[in-house]
Image (cartoon, rainbow, N blue to C red):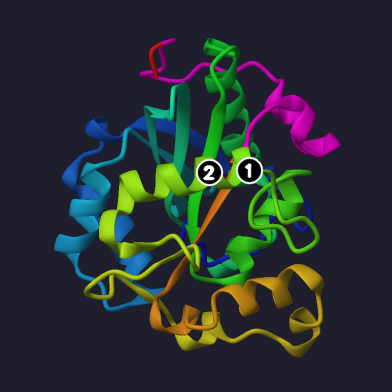
Amino acid sequence: MNAATLPLFRGTSESNLNASVVLRESIPESLVWEMYQLYAANYLDTSAELFRSDLSEKTHVLMLRNDVGQLCGFSTIQLYSSTVDTTAVRVVYSGDTIIAPAYWGSQALAFEWIRFAGETYRLNPDVPLYWLLIVKGHRTYRFLPAFARRYVPHHADPGTDIELRTRAVLAAEKFGESFDAQTGLVRFSSCLGRLNPSLADIPARHQRLPDVAHFLALNPGYRNGDELVCLCRLTPENLRPRAARVFCEPGQYPGLSSSD
């Protein structure tokens, strides 16, 4: 999740914002181009071809629009099933996530993402559901403590053997030789996008926060596009109270089935 935002659970009202989840395959080319333009405004080392290639692997896209229908944010999502050792698991993989600076502080995209994850969980609650994301910025890493109680890597908890093993297996499966199991980092052979310097800069007051300091210690090369692999088990019990309430709200979303 390459997020150019820190919007979770604070900030402006989203009464003038509309969040919706659509199937990736239903998105017209004109909207793909609009998404790319928003993405390219925040990232270096990208191209329309790279963006389209990454998008083609996703199953859903969460769209954020203002009251006149203008696209002002999105998050790409891939739902898939896997196996960790002998245990079947389901995965919500977060891809590119962008919110236009004018809407930083809105909770609309975050709430809709949690609601979508909750509906996915309820389709098959007996099969563990994990949130997998790769992080190249401190703002994105701070999504984790805003959402969840337990996740890896956590600044105050080394993680259980099961959590660490699950992260390693899923990361190796998805990123192959680009994933370094010793560091927990993904380094692609050619850079797939770096944050603009204005977004990569970390204010001094944030650097003193324990979670941000932990991120910097684990991913000192984030400015170069290095990605930290993170994992979170999605259950009502593991989410913080406000996130858990949204997670448990019913929703209707295209393309969801008990086999996802």
Q: Position of residue 188 (x, y in %)?
A: 28, 69
Which residue range is magenta in the image?
A: 233-258
Q: Position of residue 116 (x, y in %)?
A: 55, 28
> The residue under label 1 is which amino acid type?
Asp
Q: Measure the C-alpha gap from mark 2 to mark 1.
A: 6 Å
Q: Is residue 146 above or below residue 127?
A: below
User: 10 Å neighbourhood of mark 1: few (<14), some, or many (≥20)?
Assistant: few
Q: Is residue 214 above or below residue 80?
A: below
> Secondary structure beneath disc 1?
helix
Towards the viewer: 243 or 64? 243
Q: Is residue 146 left or right of residue 52?
A: right
Residue 165 numbered tag? 2
Farthest residue to the right: give it: 241
Q: Position of residue 205 (x, y in %)?
A: 80, 84
Q: Is residue 88 above or below residue 70?
A: above
- Could you tell me which residue is drawn at 25 percent across and 52 percent down? 54
Towards the viewer: 250 or 30? 250
- Residue picked out by circle 1: 161
